[in-house]
């Protein structure tokens, strides 16, 4: 499993380079992609190598809302302010990445469910309005051929 994780971690640098121009125009700092397939297997990609490494080392896949809570897949979007603020993953996201406000865009695919977690380092909660009022821009960003695997 370590070799697979190391390969995924190395992809983070490429993902960050691809996302950087779009991050600036969309006021984003972070992308974390989770794909849960029909058999329960999960794939991760992230724009931040340290975050993904931390996430896997802390065994967050065992407690992560998008890996464990099947009900969340019934939504199309989830603002992180609507999640449990004591969730250790959200606490670490704020402390480690400076990302407090984010949105998860959920896409149903033939082979499972995609969760696109995107967020900003801003401490200004008005970013939430930007997410809601510009969902089409964020969806276009994640649907680019170079983001979808």
Image (cartoon, rainbow, N blue to C red):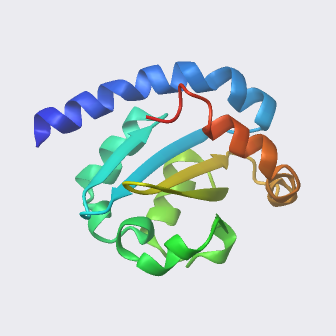
User: Is 43 displayed left or right of 72 in the figure?
Assistant: left
Of residue 57 and residue 139, the one placed in the foreground of this image is 139
Q: From the top left corner, tell me how far across and down residue 28 is, in percent.
A: 70, 39
Q: How many marks?
A: 0
Q: Quadrant of the C terminus?
A: top left
- Give the left or right position of residue 69, taking residue 78 as reference: left
Question: Can residue 29 be seen in the rendering of this structure?
Answer: no
| Image position of 87 with respect to 119: above or below | below
Please give left or right for residue 68 compared with residue 140 in the image. left
Residue farthest along the front direction in this orientation: 110
Q: Position of residue 59 (x, y in %)?
A: 25, 60
Q: Nearer the viewer, residue 97 or 78?
A: 78
Q: Position of residue 137 (x, y in %)?
A: 79, 41
The structure residue drawn at horizontal position 17% and vertical position 36%, both measured from the top left corner, is: 4
Q: Quadrant of the N terminus?
A: top left
| The quarter of the displayed image where residue 26 is located | top right
Indicate left or right for 126 with 34 as reference: right
Viewer-closest of 145 and 32: 145
Q: Is residue 17 something one can see in this rendering?
A: yes
Choose between 122 and 130: the one closer to the eye: 130
Seen in the picture, residue 93 relative to 11 is either above or below; the reply is below
Q: Residue 30 in the image: x percent, y percent?
A: 58, 41
Give me the residue at 33% from left, 71% from top. Answer: 63
Which residue is painted at 31% across and 25% down in the image?
10
- The residue shown at (59%, 75%) is 83
């Amino acid at each position: 499993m370590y070799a697979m994780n190391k390969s995924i971690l190395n992809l983070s640098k490429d993902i960050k380079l691809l996302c950087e121009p779009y991050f600036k125009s969309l006021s984003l700092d972070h992308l974390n992609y989770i794909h849960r397939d029909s058999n329960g297997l999960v794939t991760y990609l992230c724009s931040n190598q340290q975050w993904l490494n931390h996430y896997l080392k802390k065994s967050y896949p065992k407690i992560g809302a998008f890996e464990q809570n099947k009900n969340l897949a019934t939504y199309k979007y989830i603002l992180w302010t609507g999640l449990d603020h004591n969730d250790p993953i959200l606490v670490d996201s704020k402390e480690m990445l400076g990302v407090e406000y984010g949105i998860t865009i959920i896409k149903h695919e033939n082979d499972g469910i995609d969760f696109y977690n995107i967020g900003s380092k801003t401490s200004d909660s008005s970013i939430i309005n930007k997410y809601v009022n510009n969902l089409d821009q964020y969806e276009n960003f994640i649907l680019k051929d170079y983001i979808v695997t």
